[in-house]
Amino acid sequence: MIAVVGPGALHADPDVLRNAERVGELLAQAGHDVVTGGLDGVMEAASRGAKNAGGKVLALLPGSDRTDATPYADIVIPTGVGQARNVLVVRAADAVIAVGGSWGTLSEVAIAMRLAKPVVWLRGWQVKGAEEEVPTAASPEQAVAWVVAAPHS
């Protein structure tokens, strides 16, 4: 299972959304299930891409209302833990692709790094002075190839 994380619709530009949808599609085509935070923006775009390519999607919502989930999720879990659900999204995944950037996305990348999960940015933030650099992909194809090839714990 691969997590696709990124900003909600308010902070995601059309290129980021197109990239997220393509990432979801490529992951499903490669036989991977997708886990997201289950809402709009990058989460919905990646879910749509995966679902349309025949993949399975797990949505871990921050709130308690199941109806908040993207319609492209197969399994919806309303965690009720707010932003703490970011930990659950990363924990559920074997690797993480971060598409675009927001504060929530940055937290998910940091959690993945702390847990030694493979993580790659696609059009994400560059964190200067970090102990370890997060690899950056130039395309959805490169991001998916990187996480598929990365050793998973």
Image: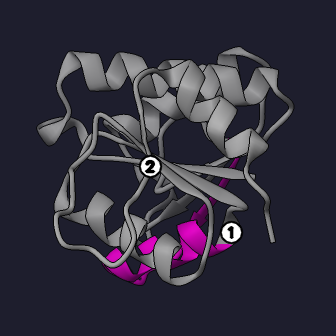
Is any part of residue 29 visible from this angle? yes
Which x, y percent locates residue 146?
A: 64, 39
The dot on residue 92 is 1
Label 2 or label 1, whichever comes before in sequence order: 1
Which x, y percent locates residue 144?
A: 63, 32
Q: Which residue is mark 2?
A: 135
* Residue plotted at (26% across, 74% down): 130
The dot on residue 80 is none
Which x, y percent locates residue 113?
A: 48, 74
| Element at label 2 | loop
Q: Is residue 3 above or below residue 27?
A: below
Residue 77 covered by magenta stretch:
yes
Give the alpha-carbon distance from disc 2 to disc 1, as whole Å: 21 Å
Residue 147 covered by magenta stretch:
no
On the rendered image, what quadrant is the C terminus found in? bottom right
Residue type, numbered disc 2: Pro
* Residue plotted at (41% across, 84% down): 81
Q: Name the front one of labels 2 and 1.
A: 2
Q: Viewer-proximal residue, 7 or 150? A: 150
Q: How was this image coloured? A: one colour
Q: Is residue 5 above or below residue 53?
A: below
Magenta stretch, residue numbers: 74-91
